[in-house]
Image: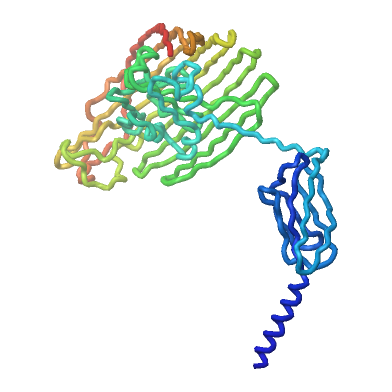
Amino acid sequence: MKHIYLILILALFNLAAFAQNGNIKGKITSADGHPAAFVTVGLKDTKKGAVTSEEGEFILKNIRQGEHVLVISCTGMKTVHKPVSVTADQTTDMSLSLEATSAQLNEIVVEGSRTRTINKRPVSVSKLPVAAIDLPQGVAVIGHEVLEDQQVQRMSDVVKSVNGVYMASSRAGTQESFNARGYGFSSSNMFKNGARVNSGVMPEMSSLERVEILKGSAAILYGNVAPGAVMNMVTKQPKFNFGGELNIRAGSYGLFKPAFDVYGPLSSKIAYRVNGTFETTDSYRDKVHSKRYYVNPSLLFKLSERTELVVQGDYLKHDFTPDFGIGSLDNTKIADVPRNNFYGTPWQYAHTQQSSAGASVKHQLNDNWTLNGMFTYQRYSRDYYAIERIQADATGKWARPLNRAYNSEDYYIAQVDLTVKFKTGSLQHNVLAGIDGDRYYTKAFSYNQPATYDTINILHPDLYTPRTDIPRLPESRASRLRSIVWVYMYRT
C-alpha cells in the first residue's frame, strides 16, 4: 500500500508541474507575405525546437511559464530573436515576417562530367575520327583497364574477351596463330600503331594501351589481308604530366617479371614515355625455359597548335626452348607418360628479335580537314634449331626429326591519310582517302639436314641412348624483295 501511495503522490506532482506549462504556436511568412516553409524555430537556452510546415506554421508544446526568446532562422533570411511570454495552461499565439539578408552566401560550385567510355572514343584501326559506338563496322576494343585487371601475359589472353576471334595454334610455344570468322591471321593481319608487324614473335603486352580488332570484310580497308579481321595493338603514348609505375610479377614455375613505365614533359612542347620489362620463366616441362627483354621509348612533339609528331622505337628479344609436348602414339592416342617429360634435345633453341622505329604526324588543316602521315621501319629475325613434332609408333619408338631455320626481314611502311568532315542538310559525313605503301626484303637460309637425328622410345627410355651433340649443317640462302601500294577511299 505504501508503494501505491508513493506512485499516486508522484503522479499528482507531475500533473501539477505540467499544469504550470504552456504552448507556443504561430505562423511565419516571408517579406512578400507568402508562407515561409521549413524555417527553424528554436527556444533559446533549451533543446526545444520545431520546423515550419509548408503553410509556415509551427507549434512548441509544454513550455515552462515565464519569459523566453524564440530564435527563428532560415538560409538567406535575417535571424530573428523574438521575446515571448508563456502563461501556464495557455497557448501563446504569434506571427511574424522574415526579411531577406544582404549578406553574401559562400559560393558553392557544382561540377559534373561524363566519363568517355572506351566505346565513345575514336579507334585507330578505323583510320577515322569516329567513336567506336558510331562505326558501322564490327569493332572490339580491349582497353588497358581490362589488360591490367586480367594481368595478361600473351595475346591469347586478350582474344578470350573478343567473340569471333580465337587462338588456332601455338606451335611449340614459338608463336601464337589466330583465326577470325573462319579465316586465319597472318603477318598481314597484325598491326602495331597502324603498321604491319611480323607475327612470328609473341608481342609484349605490358606496353599496350589497348587492342583494337576490326572484324569481317571491313578488314579489306588494310589491303592485302585475310578478310576475317585485323588486329591493331596501340602502345602507351607520352604525356605532359609526370607519372609512372614499377611492378613485379612472380608466379609458378619460376616466373619473374619486373616492369617499369615512366612518362612526363621535357618542356612545354615535348613529352616522353619509356616502358620496358624483363621476363624469365621455366615450365612444368623439364628443361624448358624462356627469357624475354623489351623496351619501348617514345617522344611527342607539339610542333604547333594544329600539328603534333610522335617518334617511337620498340625492341623485343625472346630466347626460349621449343616444346612440342609429349606427342602421340601412332597418331591415335596420347602417350601415357608424365606430362613433365621433355623429348627434345638439351641444346635446342629459338632466338627471336624484333625491333622497329617510326614516326607519325597529325596536322589539322582546319576544323574539318585533317592530314595524317606515318613511316615505320621494322627488323625481324628468327634463329631456330630443334627437334620437331613428336609422332611415335604404337610401341613408343620414335625417330626424332631435326629442323634448322634462319630467316630475317626488313620491312618499310608508309601511309598518308586525309579525313574530311562535312554536312548535307542534317546528315554528318566523314570521308577517308589515303594511300599505303610497303616494301620488304626477306632472307631465308635453308640447310642440308638429315631426315632423322636419332631414335628413342618415349615409353621405354632405357631402350635407346639419345644423342646430345649439335650437328653442323651446311647452309644456302634465298632472298626475296616485294613492294605493294594500296589506295583506298571510305565514307561513313
Across and down, in percent, residue 447 comes to 30, 20
Residue 4 in which image quadrant: bottom right
Across and down, in percent, residue 476 comes to 32, 15
Q: Residue at x 31, y 28 (%)?
A: 471
Q: Is residue 462 visible?
A: no
Across and down, in percent, residue 340 comes to 31, 45
Left or right? Give the position of 92 relative to 427. right
Comparing 14 with 335, the one in front is 14
Across and down, in percent, residue 442 comes to 38, 14
Q: Residue at x 79, y 69 (%)?
A: 88
Comparing 62 with 265, the one in front is 62
Q: Is residue 184 visible?
A: yes
Comparing 288 with 160, the one in front is 160
Of all residues shown, which one is farthest toward the bottom?
1
Q: Is residue 315 above or below residue 283?
A: above
Left or right? Give the position of 186 relative to 236. left
Left or right? Give the position of 331 relative to 376. left
